[in-house]
Image: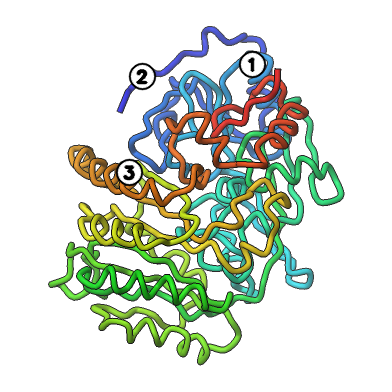
């Protein structure tokens, strides 16, 4: 990890800085402030960046002032929503960070089945508010993740086979673009920009609020089933066929974990590598969910079976304690167009070697409702792949990361012959390179460049998996 010294604000126009501070209803945090170090801390402890200013916004007007200030002073600009971006792209060195963490309001309209969510909210806040009405919208699998970052990159999780990606359920959004203007986008208003933010990441502005479609989801039949790791190849072969015929109401992802030292895991299995299949049935009939999960209980004898009726917010926060703030993270991701025999052999070799409690490999199906949206209907265009894998090296101790990362890199490289050229944008690291970004968006890339050129011709919003404007 490279550590830099905090930048001062001496090179910034002091008169303009005083004006910014006077006009902001929120807080402008500078390197000399006592709260600075806490304010620059994000989820991934490998990231240690020192911005010149952090503007903790109270409303959209604050965001407009901050964008205009960054542009006028030619400052590098980053945007922080939930602070979970593993690549550290919600923070920057020497520039200005727009921090939306105080803008976290959620309002549910139970009659219209919609949610209005501010840009700094986490999925846990939205899950909690919607659950009171028996409603939910697709999110990820960690409730502390920010709504904004996940949605702008696509967003898949427990409900995605049933109801699509997070961005597929976006009805409208409010966004401040590089010219400091506040715009509402939807299918009818600024449709080109609405298309681009549904998968194009933070390239086009600061989204201050989102309007989502909600679905009737209250209790689900879900949770993890753990198996002996010796059964990996048998389980993967079964899982491939199982998911191809599963109804869209059933989601499941395949993973490798060391058994967590938790009361619900027998002590002899603590820190022992195991296979886990995490399921979620979100249909109307719990009995059907139990029947659909039955084959997973029969293919091999589970070591631990934790599947049952559970509130959706509880399922979506089940892994929060394991993946708490302050851990070291480095990830490798790729799409797998099909789960081929060769890939199963690779997973069966490397997965059982999972080197630490938090390190893992997740294999997420991209089928069901995800594939019912056309490749060009949203900026997220990877609609015909079968899976995305994410191999992660995570540890509380930096000294362990070289060993963890060596496992991760060897695993990812062995899977390369079975992988597509692009990867899921929310899982990409900062050093992936421009060609990787282009491959991730495929046929949609040139249209994204057109929208970027129209709304951000100077590339003010470039602290992201960047789509460069023309010229």
Mark-to-mark CA distance, 3 and 1? 51 Å
Decide: few, some or many residues near mark 1? Use Cα within 10 Å; few <14, some 14-19, many ≥20.
Answer: few
Reply above or below: 97 against 6.
below
Q: Badge 3, how many Cα within 10 Å: few under 14, some, many 20+?
A: few
Where residue 69 sits: x, y (%)? Answer: 67, 20
Q: Position of residue 214 (x, y in %)?
A: 68, 67
Q: Is residue 297 visible?
A: yes
In this view, the residue farthest toward the left is 268
Residue 181 versus residue 367 in the image, above or below = above
Which residue has dot 3 on it?
Answer: 413
| Up-down relation of residue 404 to residue 434 (above or below) | below
Q: Which residue is mark 2?
A: 4
Q: How far apart, in angstroms, are the residues tagged by discs 1 and 2?
A: 26 Å
CB contact under 8 Å: marks 1 and 2: no
Sequence-earlier tag: 3 or 2: 2
Label 2 SS: loop
Can residue 64 be seen in this snapshot? no
**Marks 3 and 1 in Cβ contact (< 8 Å):** no
Q: Secondary structure at mark 1?
A: helix
In percent of width and height, residue 26 lies at 62, 34
Residue labelled with disc 1 = 18
């Amino acid at each position: 990890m490279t550590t830099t010294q905090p930048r001062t604000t001496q090179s910034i126009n002091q008169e303009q800085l005083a004006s910014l501070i006077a006009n902001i209803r929120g807080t402008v945090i500078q390197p000399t402030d006592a709260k600075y170090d806490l304010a620059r801390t994000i989820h991934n402890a490998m990231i240690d960046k020192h911005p010149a200013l952090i503007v903790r916004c109270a409303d959209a007007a604050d965001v407009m002032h901050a964008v205009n200030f960054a542009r006028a002073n030619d400052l590098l600009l980053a945007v922080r929503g939930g602070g979970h971006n593993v690549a550290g792209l919600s923070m920057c060195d020497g520039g200005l960070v727009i921090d939306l963490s105080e803008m976290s309001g959620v309002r549910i309209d139970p009659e219209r089945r919609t949610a209005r969510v501010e840009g700094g909210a986490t999925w846990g806040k939205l899950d909690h508010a919607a659950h009171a009405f028996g409603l939910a919208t697709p999110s990820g699998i960690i409730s502390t993740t920010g709504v904004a970052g996940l949605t702008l990159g696509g967003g898949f999780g427990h409900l995605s086979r049933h109801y699509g990606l997070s961005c597929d359920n976006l009805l409208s959004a409010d966004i401040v673009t590089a010219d400091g203007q506040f715009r509402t986008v939807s299918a009818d208003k600024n449709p080109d920009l609405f298309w681009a933010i549904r998968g194009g990441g933070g390239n086009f502005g600061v989204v201050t609020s989102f309007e989502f479609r909600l679905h009737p989801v209250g209790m689900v039949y879900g949770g993890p089933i753990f198996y002996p790791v010796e059964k990996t190849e048998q389980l993967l072969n079964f899982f491939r066929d199982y998911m191809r015929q599963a109804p869209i109401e059933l989601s499941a992802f395949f993973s490798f974990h060391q058994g967590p030292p938790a009361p619900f895991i027998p002590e002899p299995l603590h820190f022992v590598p195991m296979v886990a299949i995490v399921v979620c049935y979100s249909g109307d009939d719990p009995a059907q969910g139990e029947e659909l999960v039955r084959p997973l209980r029969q293919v091999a004898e589970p070591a631990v079976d934790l599947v049952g009726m559970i509130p959706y917010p509880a399922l979506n926060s089940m892994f929060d304690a394991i993946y708490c703030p302050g851990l070291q993270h480095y990830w490798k991701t790729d799409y797998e167009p099909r789960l081929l025999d060769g890939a199963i052999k690779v997973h069966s070799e490397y997965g059982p070697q999972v080197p630490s409690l938090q390190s893992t490999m997740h294999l997420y199906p991209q089928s069901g409702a995800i594939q019912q949206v056309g490749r060009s209907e949203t900026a997220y265009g990877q609609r015909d792949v079968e899976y995305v894998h994410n191999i992660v090296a995570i540890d509380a101790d930096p000294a362990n990361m070289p060993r963890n990362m060596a496992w991760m890199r060897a695993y990812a490289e062995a899977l390369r012959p079975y992988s597509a050229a692009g990867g899921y944008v929310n899982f990409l690291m900062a050093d992936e390179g421009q060609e990787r970004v282009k491959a991730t968006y495929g046929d949609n890339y040139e249209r994204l460049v057109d929208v970027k050129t129209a709304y951000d011709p100077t590339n003010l919003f470039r602290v992201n998996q960047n789509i460069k404007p023309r010229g």
